[in-house]
Image (cartoon, coloured by chain):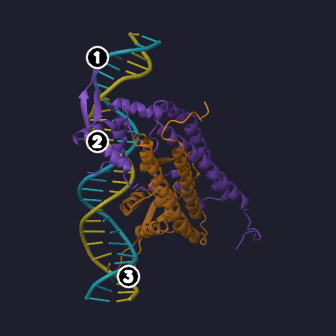
Chain colours: A purple, B orange, C cyan, D yellow
Amino acid sequence: VALKPSSYLILGLVRGGMTSGYAIKRFIDETRMPVFWATTLAQIYPELAHLEDAGYLSSTDDPHGARQRRAYSLTPTGERALMAWLRRAQVPPMELRDEGLLRLAFADNLPRDEAIALVGRLRARSEEAAREFRDEIVPIGEALRAGGLRFPVVIGQIGADYHAWAAERLRALEAELQGESGEPVRESRRP
Amino acid sequence: VALKPSSYLILGLVRGGMTSGYAIKRFIDETRMPVFWATTLAQIYPELAHLEDAGYLSSTDDPHGARQRRAYSLTPTGERALMAWLRRAQVPPMELRDEGLLRLAFADNLPRDEAIALVGRLRARSEEAAREFRDEIVPIGEALRAGGLRFPVVIGQIGADYHAWAAERLRALEAELQGESGEPVRESRRP
DNA sequence: GGAAGCATGTAAAGTGTTACATGATTTT
DNA sequence: AAAATCATGTAACACTTTACATGCTTCC
């Protein structure tokens, strides 16, 4: 029974010291460390229960005063599963599913100026995302680095660099589209 | 009742001349034009039916001999909905959900050489994807361009450029990780 | 006559999101 | 006393994927 990526996410976070459902939620909200595999609160608790049933996690009650809390930890099986996943030779192909680029694919339905405006909106979106990665996610990663974790900051930087690249790429596309005049030009294009 | 991205995908393809469910499937298989919003055969037929119920599409029987076929076309409502979507000022944030980058986020659990190997696998994956975009998807887009469609090739090129960029970015990360020696170095790092 | 392609669908399971629901404790 | 935070969950819905199911037509 193969685990899904969100299961490994939970496994990895428990292994990293986020031992309760709430701690996992808070870590995700605060650090946005798993930006490349989002999950929501409603998935965490069922997933923890499922991983315990399947023998990857074990749990003990760990109340603070009268406030309940359940503390999870990896079983040897869970440990093995996480490491095997990290070491697996095959990495599934990247899937990026983006409504913005889907719109762009249909931009032939728009007049040229409106197509350019659409590209401009996509560029603005990437600029905003780049800012967010640079100013919020990377600094949090740098804070975690003090605790010996170097990869959160690495993926934050990759995210920041990606969006910066995308913004530039879209700016180039805007320029290219603007360069093509509305009236057909006397062949200035190579054959 | 807002339509979902896959609905607009279908609407856009019908508008582009793929008037039957099978034609849509074939176009997707052959051109892989909507790489940034994948869909499967099992979604197409229910979606066509749903869009007709909701008044965005109309259909007529269009058999070839005794072989049945249902031909769809956009109603004025469908036309308006598609154009409004393309013109909408707000573009939802890009979501990229990638198991590979999720693994990288947890690479602190691996010894350095294995972490480097993981980055290497991710790089190889991007190189492969770049090749696929460059050698397969872009040429198909260029063929479509003859028919007046210029944006399929644009998104193919964006995909190719993205993966090429990613491969280079990951190669830089490999080098960076390799540069850090196993034993702690006498502070060659700025404060 | 058989294989490949054309054509349309369904069933079931898996996966994920939004909104709701509850209650204790700590801080202001 | 109220607000914020800690803590755990459920219900309903939305969406996607995998696998299955059927039958005709054209080409070899």
Residue depicted at x 52% and y 66%: B137
Mark 2 sits on what residue?
Answer: A78
Mark 3 burial class by Cα count in 10 Å: few <14, some 14-19, many 20+: few
Which mark, residue A65?
1
Q: Residue A57's quadrant in the figure?
A: top left
As helix, strand or loop, the secondary structure at mark 3 comes to loop
User: What chain is tagged by disc 1?
Assistant: A
Alpha-carbon span between mark 2 and mark 1: 30 Å
Residue B52 vs residue A51, the one in the foreground? A51
In the rendered image, which residue does mark 3 sit on? B65
Counting from the top left corner in percent of width and height, residue D2 is at 41, 14
Image: B18 above or below B122: below
What amino acid type is highlighted by mark number 3?
A: Gly
* Label 2 SS: helix
Name the subunit of mark 3.
B
Q: Which chain carries label 2?
A: A
Observer-nearest of D3 and A146: A146
